[in-house]
Image (tube, rainbow, N blue to C red):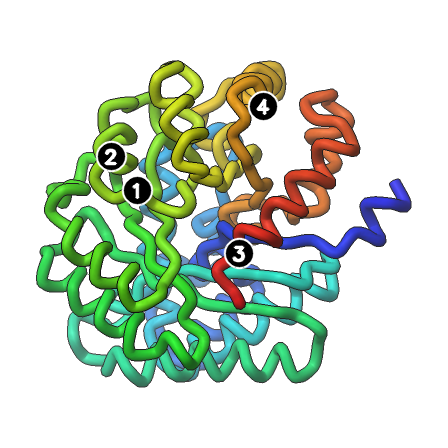
């Protein structure tokens, strides 16, 4: 697959907490003197990578440890520089958006958010000095924290818009107390400031939650969004509003949201039938134990998408990026 090796890739959906290798996180933890759940490196590696067929909740819980390790300005500098540099060297990724929640990296208020954000942006700048990569940050709101705390995140995103923050997201467990309607004013504020809007939704079969997110927030992009394939009306709305989906195949298979590649073939067929644009992503290569090039290769060899469709998905990602 010489064409795939040469293809300049774009990734739009990658969590910083899932995009740093276990070896680097191990070193970062020891450098900070963080007490880890185990002193055995191999056990640590299993704790922060998605093992065979774990649940979505198991996956989300792993972030508690990786976010703790990344909870210092210096750690975020290292994490971002490493993630961007590695993406280019290993996958020829030349456009990369990395997302994270700064509040989950301030050790319950001990760390200053501005320091965390600025150091993360400087880490990206350092990597982009070394490699020909366009990279930006998406700051994540979360369904599990208050509207006030989410507003702080949006305000920080606006503050650092001209430094490398390119968008906002709503992430977190889908049964969290925060609804799309509750953060609608925050999304409106971010959009007015020129930030891109992407929303985690449609990862689980809860079509109603996705309806709420799409109708209340009208995002530019949706993280995952595969639940829409069960609802033709929702598919038509996505197509009408030109909302781009950030599909993460291996992640969805690993967390048992999708049974396997045969089901994904049906999912993509529906998206194509309704004219919905989609992109291919890892969700976070280190935790998922798959890189973006391998995502493309698996979709090809399992006859889910053709070479031409994969190239089109990559072109869509580049055009849909929030990075100017």
- Sequence-wise, the earlier of marks 2 and 4 is 2
Mark-to-mark CA distance, 1 and 3: 17 Å
The front one of 182 and 242 is 242
Please tell me in which quadrant of the rendered image residue 303 appears: top right
Residue carrying label 4: 272
Q: Is residue 66 among what the camera can see?
A: no
Percent across and percent down for residue 5 are 83, 50
Residue carrying label 3: 321
Q: Residue at x 56, y 33 (%)?
A: 249
The disc label shown at residue 38, or none:
none
Quadrant location of the N terminus?
Answer: top right
Percent across and percent down for residue 158 are 29, 72
Callout 3: SS = loop
- Sequence-wise, the earlier of marks 1 and 4 is 1
User: Answer yes or no: do the residues labelled 1 and 3 have beta carbons within 8 Å?
Assistant: no
- Sequence-wise, the earlier of marks 1 and 3 is 1
Q: Residue at x 69, y 53 (%)?
A: 9
- Sequence-wise, the earlier of marks 4 and 3 is 4
Label 4 environment density (alpha carbons within 10 Å; few <14, some 14–19, many ≥20): few
Mark-to-mark CA distance, 2 and 4: 22 Å
Q: Is residue 129 above or below residue 61?
A: below
Label 2 environment density (alpha carbons within 10 Å; few <14, some 14–19, many ≥20): some
Mark-to-mark CA distance, 1 and 4: 21 Å
Residue carrying label 1: 218
Q: Residue at x 42, y 45 (%)?
A: 221
Q: Is residue 167 above or below residue 252?
A: below
Question: Could you tell whether 307 is left or right of 316 in the image?
Answer: right
User: Answer yes or no: do the residues labelled 1 and 4 have beta carbons within 8 Å?
Assistant: no
Callout 4: SS = helix
Percent across and percent down for residue 101 are 31, 62
Question: Could you tell whether 259 is left or right of 102 in the image?
Answer: right
Residue carrying label 2: 215
């Amino acid at each position: 697959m010489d064409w795939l090796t040469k293809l300049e890739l774009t990734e739009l959906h990658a969590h910083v907490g899932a995009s740093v290798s276990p070896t680097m996180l191990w070193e970062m933890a020891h450098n900070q003197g963080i007490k880890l759940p185990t002193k055995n490196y191999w056990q640590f590696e299993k704790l922060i990578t998605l093992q065979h067929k774990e649940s979505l909740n198991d996956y989300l819980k792993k972030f508690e440890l990786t976010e703790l390790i990344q909870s210092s300005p210096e750690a975020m500098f290292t994490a971002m520089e490493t993630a961007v540099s590695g993406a280019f060297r290993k996958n020829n990724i030349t456009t990369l958006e990395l997302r994270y929640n700064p509040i989950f990296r301030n050790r319950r208020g001990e760390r200053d958010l501005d320091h965390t954000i600025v150091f993360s942006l400087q880490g990206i700048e350092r990597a982009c000095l070394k490699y020909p990569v366009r990279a930006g940050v998406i700051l994540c709101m979360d369904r599990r924290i208050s509207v006030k705390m989410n507003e702080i995140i949006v305000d920080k995103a606006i503050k650092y818009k001209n430094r490398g923050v390119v968008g906002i997201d709503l992430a977190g467990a889908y049964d969290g107390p925060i609804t799309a309607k509750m953060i609608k004013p925050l999304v409106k504020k971010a959009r007015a400031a020129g930030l891109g809007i992407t929303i985690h939704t449609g990862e689980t079969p809860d079509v109603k939650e996705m309806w709420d997110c799409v109708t209340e927030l009208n995002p530019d992009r949706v993280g995952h969004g595969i639940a829409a394939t069960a609802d033709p009306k929702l598919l038509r709305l996505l197509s009408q509003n030109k909302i781009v989906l950030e599909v993460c195949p291996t992640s969805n298979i690993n967390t048992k949201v999708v049974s396997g590649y045969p089901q994904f073939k049906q999912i993509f067929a529906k998206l194509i039938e309704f004219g919905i644009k989609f992109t291919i992503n890892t969700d976070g290569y280190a935790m998922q134990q798959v890189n973006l090039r391998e995502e493309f290769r698996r979709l090809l060899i399992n006859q889910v998408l053709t070479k031409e469709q994969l190239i089109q998905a990559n072109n869509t990602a580049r055009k849909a990026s929030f990075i100017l």
